Amino acid sequence: MRSMEGQRSDNRPLKRSDDEKRRALLQLEAAYAALGPKPTPGLKETMAERIRALKAEIAEGASKPPRRERDRDRG
């Protein structure tokens, strides 16, 4: 079945708030710490890359003023 325009299954990245990103980061870091010695190096590297990407997104979001303030500046 095909998706309709605007559905979440449109193969578009989901937009997450900073709180959701922080929560996902905490969960991913906990899962990474609990991996142990058996997982493949590729899995560990993929998780480490995602952790780095989430940290960068959070840092980027922290450097921008909140959206309402940015919209007022455009005025």
Image (cartoon, rainbow, N blue to C red):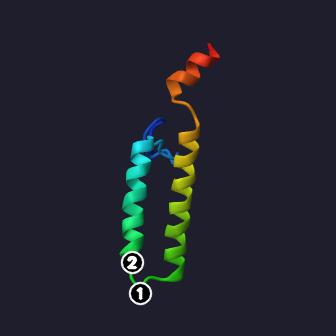
Crowd around label 1: few <14 · some 14–19 · many ≥20 (10 Å)? few
Q: Which residue is mark 1?
A: 38
Q: Residue at x 42, y 50 (%)?
A: 22
Crowd around label 2: few <14 · some 14–19 · many ≥20 (10 Å)? few
Picture coordinates of residue 7, whole percent (x, y) = 43, 39
Picture coordinates of residue 60, whole percent (x, y) = 58, 44
In depth, the one of 41 and 32 nearer the eye is 32
Tell me if 37 is positioned left or right of 67 in this view: left
Where on the picture, by quarter, is residue 42? bottom right
The three-letter code of the residue at mark 2 reads Leu
Q: Residue at x 41, y 63 (%)?
A: 28
In depth, the one of 9 and 61 nearer the eye is 61
List the single residue furthest toward the top.
75
Residue 56 drawn above or below residue 67: below
Q: Residue at x 53, y 55 (%)?
A: 55
Residue 1 visible in image? no
Q: Which residue is mark 2?
A: 35
Evaluate if marks 2 and 1 touch, with contact meaning CB atoms under 8 Å apart. yes
